[in-house]
Structures are given as structure tokens and as C-alpha cells.
Image (cartoon, grey):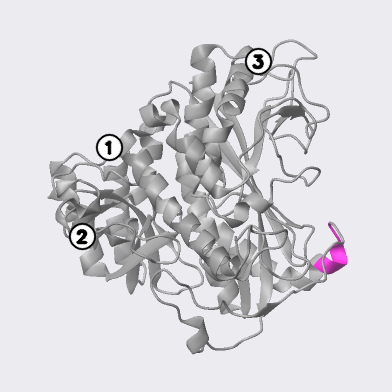
Amino acid sequence: MFIERHGLWSAEQRARAKELKQRLKREPLDLVRLAWADPHGASRAKAVSVPVFLQALESGYNINVATTTLDSAGGRVFQSFTRGGGMGLAEMTGSPNLVIAPDPATFRMLPWAPGVGWILCDEYFRDGTPFHFSPRHLLKKQLGKTKHELVVGLEVEWYLARLAEDRLSEEHVGTPGVRGRPVRVSPPEPGYSYHSETNMDLMQPVLARLARAYAALGLPLRSIENEWGPGQVECTFSAQGALRTADHMLLFRTATRQVCRRLGHFATFMCRPALKGYYSSGWHLHESLAGASGRNLFTPEKNGEPLSALGRSFLAGLLANARAATVFATPTVNGYRRFRPNSLAPDRAGWGYDHRGAMVRVLGGAGDPATRLENRLGEPAANPYLFIASQIVAGLDGVERGLDPGARDDEPYSADRPLLPKSLPQALEALERDALFRREFGDLFIDYFVKLKRSEAGRFLQWLEQHGMADAGEQPTEWEQNEYFDFF
């Protein structure tokens, strides 16, 4: 069988698969969604019957490679039906099949969809070679390069809204590369009453259902908070190993959107919707390295020091490689609206101690086992596997080179630090020229990712030209709303 023949599972996965087969004999189940992450970090899935799922646990399951070749509006970026698939790769000719292998450790029953299971899968070519452009494979490869464990906690902002339309019409339907109009929504609370208990209570019926769903899925929810904008919510999750955290982020977003839709509401992880009064949302990564014993290696030994020597070098790597890594943390046109001075989001690559204006906020100190770096670079639409993998590459580069982050920035918006890219094209240019990420992710992946995202950026620039606009302006555009509001 495919999985056993190519040695794709660990001993633990084989044991979990055996347990899963026994479990399915006891629990009612109609379908299982075989899910995988596309390059944008969106969950793609096929639903299969139970007998086919049991077979997939041995032989894998065939999927089309097509989801890898589409940009954020479903437009085909690569010429799949030419020799080499438009990538110069013989194995990509003709939009061939891949084989996805379920990861038994990720199986869940979906609490909002009775009789439906869900499991994450890894993509392979038919000869057992890991798929070149799989974000999950890329993260696992980077994790294999460090002797320490990267521990990551999630702090994610998103928008909850009420649906103002009860059905779709022709104007909601787009074409490949051109999205239709997203559904109209209304805010569930007026916003700009930070942490208002009364306003949070207006959203409580939906938030309670979400909390129950997260618990049933095993997502380690810590808090749900009423944030700044109208209907803006922040969810935080306890720190876990990097791969598990990335898997949790993928499931968290898809669960949130599906549960809310069933309740007559709408959830979006678009950074800044083009709606009146909406504020930008961010995704902050809380990260540290742990030793074999589980001890936090960023915790300093001396009082008055914010980080250990290892932590300082890791921080320095994040800063030194910030421009090239930005596109993995902020991969959409819309996300660059966050990077404004005095906006609770960074505009340059600096650090501060417990300072929310810096790109990296250091928290903790001597005697604090929760000492960590809070990287505030990301938007909630980022691909979790690529965002987290970029942290490993950047941080370990600082460790390997013994870099120092310099003095902390108490005035981060005027500090003498490199400015972050101001647009998606600038971020892609920084990545394309970067030797470190080409070495670690490989030229093949970097060239692929740059071309994929340039398609998205190019369509936006074309839209601006068609509407006689010299630049994106201060407010989000109709194009951004159509492109991202429902996709993310």
C-alpha cells in the first residue's frame, strides 16, 4: 500500500491509525473531509465515504494538483496543459494527480456538521516524493533542521458580522481570476468601545457556540475578546509545538467561518475590510525555543535581562531578515494597510520590551518560563505554515551568525531601523532577491511563490489603472473587498 510502501508515517501515526479504525466502528459517520492547505493557507477538501476513507488510510487518495496553480481569485497562473506545466517540471505536465496521505493525529469529528469527520493530509507525487509546493511539507522540513522545539502561541484578530443577505444572486458569482461581489453584512456591535462587556454580550450567542466548537475540536482556546473595530474579535490560543499550532490555525479559521455562517453570521480574516469604520486586524505570533526537557531557552538567567543570549540572537535574526520574510506574514495586497505609524502595527524592523508599537515585542524575563517574542508582523490571512516556517529560517539565521538585535526601541516609529515593505510588490521583490530564503526554501519554491503572488498584485494594479487611480489610496478598494472578504 502507498503509505506503508513509502514509509510516510511514524510509529505514532501508525498506532493512531489503528485506534482510528477501531473508533470508526463505534461512532456514526457518513463522510470524512480529506483536507489540505493550499498555498494561500486556505483549507481545500474532498469528502469521501467511510469505506473510501479506510482505504485512504492505507493507499492515500488522488487529488488534482490544480489548487496549487490558482491565485487568490481562482485564476490559473501557470500553463498547466503545456510541457512542464508552465513550471519547467516534467512531473507537473497536464495538471496531474497527487496522492494525499491522511495524518491520523489530526482526525476530528466536526461538531457543527453531524456525521462528518475531518482530517489533514500531506501531498505526495505518485512515487512517494513530497510535493514541491506543499506548505505543510515545507514547515516540517524546517522543523527538522533545528535541535530545539519552536513553541508558538496564537493571537488572532478577525471580524464577526451579521449576514444582510439570505441568498446569493448572479452578482455574487465571478469568473476565474475575477471574484464576484461578496455578501452584504451589518456589524453586530458599534465598535470602538475597547473590551466593552456590553458590546461583547451582543455577540455572545455566536461566541459561545464558537467556544464550544473549539473545545470539541481540541483547539486550546485561552480567550475571546471584543477588540477595536465594529465586530472585531480577538482569539488567543495556548502555545504548542509549531506544526500543531499551524494545523490549529488552519482548522480555527475554517471552523470559525463555517459555524458563523450556519448561525446567520459571517466571519472574515481579511485584514481591513472595505466597510465604514473597519480597523485593520493583525495576527501576532508568540514564539520561543524549548530544549529537550521542555525548558524555555529564551528565559534569561540574570535579573534585568529580557532574554537569554540565544533569545537575543533569534530576535536579531527576525529583525535582520524581516523585509524578506514580510510576504509570508502579510501575503495580500490589503494587509499592507496595517503598516502605519502609531497604529498598533509596525512600520519598521525593530524591537521593544512590552511595547506594542515595535515589530517584535519581548515579554517575560528572569524566572519567567513564559518568556517569549511576540512578532506583530502578520495579518490574519497569512498561510500559517509559511509564516511559522519563515520564523524558523529568520531566527535560526540570527543564532547561527551570532547576531545582536541592538538596544531596544522605546520610540519604534522613529527608530533608525529598516522600513518594512509598503506594498505586496515591494515585499515580493525583497523575497526574490534574498539568498537566505532561496537557500532554505529552495529556488523552486521561491520562484513559484513569487510568480503566484505577482499574479494577484498585477491584477490589482490593472484594476487601479482601469479606474484611473495612481495608487491604492488611504481606504480599501472595491477590488480588495471582492478579492479577500469572502476568500479569507
Residue 367, quarter of picture = top right
**Could you say whether the residue bearing mark 1 is in a helix, strand or loop?**
helix
Is 323 in front, or is 266? 323
- Look at the picture and state if 153 lies above or below 267: above
Which one is earlier in the sequence, the residue at label 3 or at label 1? 1
The residue that label 2 is drawn on is 95
Which residue shows up at 46% across the image and 49% down it? 247
Report whether 91 appears left or right of 341: left
**Could you say whether the residue bearing mark 3 is in a helix, strand or loop?**
loop
Is 313 in front, or is 256? 313
Q: From mark 3 to mark 1, how far is it between C-alphas? A: 35 Å
Q: Let me know if residue 147 is in the magenta part.
A: no
**Residue 206 in view, yes or no:** yes
The residue that label 1 is drawn on is 11
- Crowd rating for badge 1 (residues with CA inside 10 Å; few <14, some 14–19, many 20+): few
**Could you say whether the residue bearing mark 2 is in a helix, strand or loop?**
loop
Which residue shows up at 70% across the image and 39% down it? 347
The residue that label 3 is drawn on is 308
Range drawn in magenta: 195-199
Which one is earlier in the sequence, the residue at label 1 or at label 2? 1
- Look at the picture and state if 129 lies above or below 181: above
